[in-house]
Amino acid sequence: MPRWGYKIHEDRQVIWEEGDFSLVERIRLAEPSLCLCISCGTCASGCTAAQFTDFSLRRVIIQLQRGRIEEVRQEIDRCMLCGKCILTCPRGVNTRHLVLCIRKELSGDVLY
Ligand code: SF4
Ligand code: SF4
């Protein structure tokens, strides 16, 4: 095993085998623009909810893509659905609809 002189901190590790990707697959069908997200964070930087909480849509999307549903569940209700992030997203992700789809799926309403 080669020694590279660095190691990845445990809290930064992504263990793909442990992820549950069923949710992200259904959300992609319901809101295909999710595939355009480049995790730039523009949506989070101007987010209304982020002014009052530590909510970050960027983080939610990353957790969703990593199959970490419990983390998504803990955060998604903080979004105030104001729609500001739709106007700022450089990739045209329909963020507001994305949040609504995630909430619906997590509440048991199967979209696909
Ligand atoms: S602004 Fe758009 S592309 Fe950037 S992280 Fe948010 S949803 Fe993704
Ligand atoms: S719709 Fe939600 S994620 Fe987007 S800016 Fe408003 S509160 Fe933030």
Image (cartoon, rainbow, N blue to C red):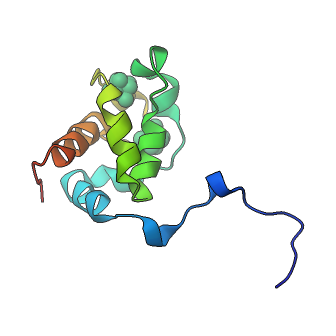
Where residue 81 sits: x, y (%)?
A: 27, 25
Q: Is residue 12 visible?
A: yes
The relative height of residue 112 versus residue 39 in the rendered view (above or below) is below
Q: Residue at x 29, y 30 (%)?
A: 77
Task: Name the quarter where the C terminus is drawn.
Answer: bottom left
Image-based side of 23 in relation to 67, left or right: left
Where residue 49 sits: x, y (%)?
A: 40, 20
Image-based side of 104 in relation to 99, left or right: left
Exactly how many numbered labels are in the figure? 0
Where residue 101 sits: x, y (%)?
A: 20, 44
Task: Name the quarter where the N terminus is drawn.
Answer: bottom right
The quarter holding residue 104 reads: top left
Image-based side of 65 in relation to 77, left or right: right
The relative height of residue 28 versus residue 44 in the rendered view (above or below) is below
Q: Is residue 84 visible?
A: no
Where residue 31 sits: x, y (%)?
A: 24, 50
The quarter holding residue 88 reads: top left
| 8 and 38: which is toward the camera | 8
Q: Residue at x 86, y 72 (%)?
A: 4
